[in-house]
Image (spheres, rainbow, N blue to C red):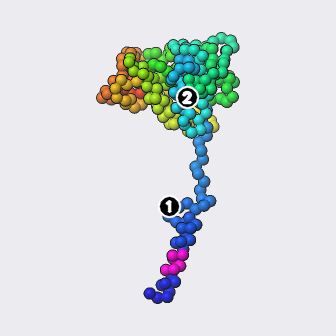
């Protein structure tokens, strides 16, 4: 080997070592390189329900949302069970007390209806206006024919009328089976993740409808997944879900729910 060739080889080796020490080279980012991606803005969520602040469903929803990064959860819920109260409100001043959910998360209990809890929060009852109202998780489905009388959906409708996006989550009940709240939490958390970017925009679009999610409690098998369908105007909402069904393309939320899907249906706020 010539002297010139040996010098070239030594120089190349030195360059490689220097690159490794300094962190330069394929697949390596040098010190002082591009910064980490910015963290998403905090999402402020008001959680309410119609089963009351001590219900298992609302606590499950709160715990699920708290696991999300940079999500601020505030709970304002009826002091007692107010199922079937639609969007009724209480005239005059509201009485409230400081309390907790069943797992000990701080909450405000309102002596009133689900819609009252939303109005209380939006009228200054909490420090900052929420970017989302999550109502639930209700014990029992709130499908098409009964959405108009549901307090869970009524709270969400109240929020939308006041310009705040809202999602209502209800867990079906099946005789002899405990409500599968974890399944409802998964659907709620997935929806929040999907819509987080839009919810945290500086000038978000005004909402025009409630996102109404119903999740079956499967006696066997598991939920077949979420599906977007219209809200039914009629149908048997008492039939147990068949999560082993092979039915595809259900026509509405009642049919979807009966065949093991978790239907997501738009509900107008009026």
Please state if 11 lies on the left or on the right of 106 as rendered. Answer: left
Q: The residue tagged with tag 1: helix, strand or loop? A: loop
Please state if 176 lies on the left or on the right of 190 as rendered. Answer: left
Quadrant location of the N terminus?
bottom left
Q: Nearer the viewer, residue 105 or 75?
A: 105
Most prominent secondary structure in the magenta stretch?
Answer: helix
Residue 62 is tagged as 2
Please state if 204 lies on the left or on the right of 253 as rendered. Answer: right
Query: Magenta part of the protein: which range?
Result: 9-14
Q: Upstream in the sequence, badge 1 or badge 2? A: 1
Residue that lies at the very extreme toward the left in this rendered image: 246
Horizontal and vertical percent for residue 103?
Answer: 56, 26
- Which residue: 48% across, 84% down? 5
The residue that label 1 is drawn on is: 27
Q: Nearer the viewer, residue 235 or 128?
A: 128
Horizontal and vertical percent for residue 207?
Answer: 56, 28
Residue 214 is tagged as none
- Which residue: 54% across, 36% down? 67
């Amino acid at each position: 080997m010539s002297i010139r060739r040996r010098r070239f080889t030594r120089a190349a080796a030195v360059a490689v070592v220097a690159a490794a020490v300094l962190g330069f080279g394929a697949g390596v980012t040098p010190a002082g390189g591009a910064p980490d991606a910015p963290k998403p803005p905090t999402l402020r969520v008001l959680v309410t329900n119609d089963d009351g602040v001590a219900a298992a469903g609302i606590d499950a929803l709160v715990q699920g949302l708290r696991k999300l990064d940079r999500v601020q959860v505030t709970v304002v819920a009826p002091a007692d069970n107010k199922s079937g109260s639609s969007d009724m409100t209480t005239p005059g001043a509201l009485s409230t007390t400081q309390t907790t959910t069943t797992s000990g998360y701080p909450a405000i209990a309102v002596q009133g209806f689900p819609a009252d809890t939303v109005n209380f929060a939006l009228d200054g009852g909490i420090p900052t206006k929420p970017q989302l109202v999550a109502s639930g998780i209700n014990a029992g489905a709130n499908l098409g024919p009964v959405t108009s009388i549901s307090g869970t959906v009524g709270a969400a409708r109240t929020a939308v009328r006041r310009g705040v996006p809202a999602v209502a989550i209800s867990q079906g009940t099946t005789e002899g089976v405990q409500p599968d709240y974890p399944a409802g939490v998964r659907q709620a958390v997935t929806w929040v993740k999907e819509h987080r970017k839009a919810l945290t925009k500086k000038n978000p679009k005004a909402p025009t409808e409630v996102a109404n999610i119903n999740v079956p409690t499967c006696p066997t098998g598991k939920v077949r997944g979420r599906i977007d369908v219209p809200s039914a105007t009629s149908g048997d909402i008492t039939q147990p879900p068949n999560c082993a069904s092979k039915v595809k393309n259900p026509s509405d939320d009642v049919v979807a729910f009966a065949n093991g899907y978790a239907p997501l249906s738009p509900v107008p706020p009026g």
